Image (tube, helix red, strand yellow):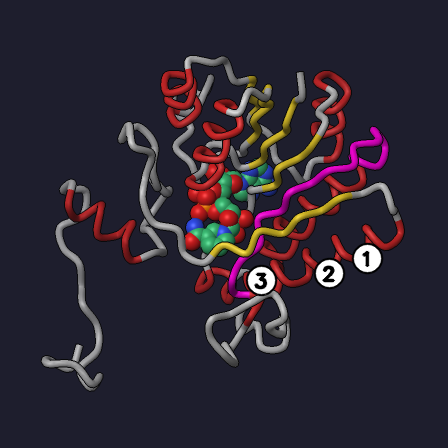
């Protein structure tokens, strides 16, 4: 049976992808360092536990940093994945301006590690979680795949997504066997229909809907609405 290695599997998008991949009949080896996912009691993050409950299938989970080549190599050696779905990344735009090196090391470093280990183990399929931010300032809508990318990425996080796409392109040119897909997510919203998994970041959410949800369930007291000179009824 085909085995997919899914990075960032305890996070928001990764947990939903893991459910879909399991439902499609593949084996999953899930990894996450829980930098932005609740890690639980240290054995298995609650999101992974819930994925198992939703799908009725077992998930092999490792709490590792995907930048750590030795650990990634151990997992490839033990589980022989057929493909990689690379979802793990740091993703807060504002934070990336304050700590750009962490963002570049984590987001670019993790992709480089995976591509190097994939090459060692002759794994030739990768799906990469990119972002609509690679489009920078939008020149026309609807945006299509011919829209320029990388010209006006305004923060380090966006740049890491653009650079990673370029790394994938260069690697595919050099290795004709490699197949890479970059999914340019916009801002996904919503949760699994079971209500068991959804967006549950560590610390204050960076996205409006996640923030609203935390206010709705009483985890945060209020939502501040900003602005006073926009062209709206009350200027907010
Ligand atoms: N949510 C969005 O609106 C959005 C939009 C565009 C792109 N993306 C991209 O989609 C991906 C997933 O986003 P998300 O919203 O699910 O974020 P998330 O923070 O919920 O999930 C990312 C997961 O990766 C883990 N992680 C980060 N660095 C790691 C590392 N070095 N090793 C192991 N695990 C690591 C985190 O602990 C987290 O669980 C990211 O690559 C992000 O850049 C998200």
Image location of residue 56, percent across then percent down: 42, 13
Q: Is residue 181 left or right of residue 22?
A: right
Residue 112 in picture, x, y percent from top left: 74, 46
Q: Against 138, is 3 above or below?
A: above
- In front: label 1 or label 3: 1
Mark 2 vs 1: CB contact within 8 A: yes
Marker disc for residue 100: 3
Q: Residue at coordinates 85% horizontally, 41% vertically from top-left?
A: 177
Q: Nearer the viewer, residue 85 or 72?
A: 85
Residue 120 at least partly seen: yes
Q: Badge 1 is on which residue?
A: 170
- Range of magenta residues: 118-133
**Mark 1 Cβ inside 8 Å of ligand 1:** no
Give the residue number, with chain letter if any, for mark 2. 166
For residue 47, above or below residue 144: above
Callout 1: helix, strand or loop? helix
Q: Give the camera-side residue of 16 and 143.
A: 143
In space, the residues marked 2 and 3 are separated at their CA atoms by 19 Å
Are discs 2 and 3 less than 8 Å apart at CB?
no
Cβ of mark 2 under 8 Å from ligand 1: the answer is no
Q: Is residue 119 magenta?
A: yes
> Quarter-wise, where is residue 72 in the image?
top right
């Amino acid at each position: 049976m085909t085995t997919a290695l899914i990075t960032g599997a305890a996070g928001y998008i990764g947990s939903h992808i893991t459910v879909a991949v399991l439902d499609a009949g593949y084996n999953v080896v899930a990894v996450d360092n829980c930098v932005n996912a609740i890690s639980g009691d240290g054995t298995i993050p609650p999101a992974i536990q819930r994925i198992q409950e939703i799908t009725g299938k077992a998930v092999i989970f490792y709490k590792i940093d995907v930048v750590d080549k030795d650990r990634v190599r151990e997992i490839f050696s033990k589980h022989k994945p057929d493909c990689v779905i690379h979802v793990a990344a740091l993703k807060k735009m504002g934070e990336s301006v304050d700590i750009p090196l962490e963002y570049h090391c984590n987001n670019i470093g993790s992709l480089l590690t995976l591509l190097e280990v994939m090459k060692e183990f002759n794994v030739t399929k990768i799906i990469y979680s990119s972002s609509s931010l690679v489009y920078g300032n939008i020149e026309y809508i609807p945006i299509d795949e011919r829209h320029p990318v990388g010209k006006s990425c305004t923060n380090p996080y966006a740049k890491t997504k653009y650079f990673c796409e370029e790394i994938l392109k260069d690697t595919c040119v050099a290795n004709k066997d490699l197949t890479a897909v970059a999914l340019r997510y916009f801002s996904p919203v919503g949760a699994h229909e079971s209500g068991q998994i959804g967006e549950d970041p560590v610390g204050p959410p960076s996205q409006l809907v996640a923030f609203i949800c935390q206010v709705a369930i009483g985890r945060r007291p209020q939502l501040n609405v900003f602005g006073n000179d926009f062209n709206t009824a009350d200027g907010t």
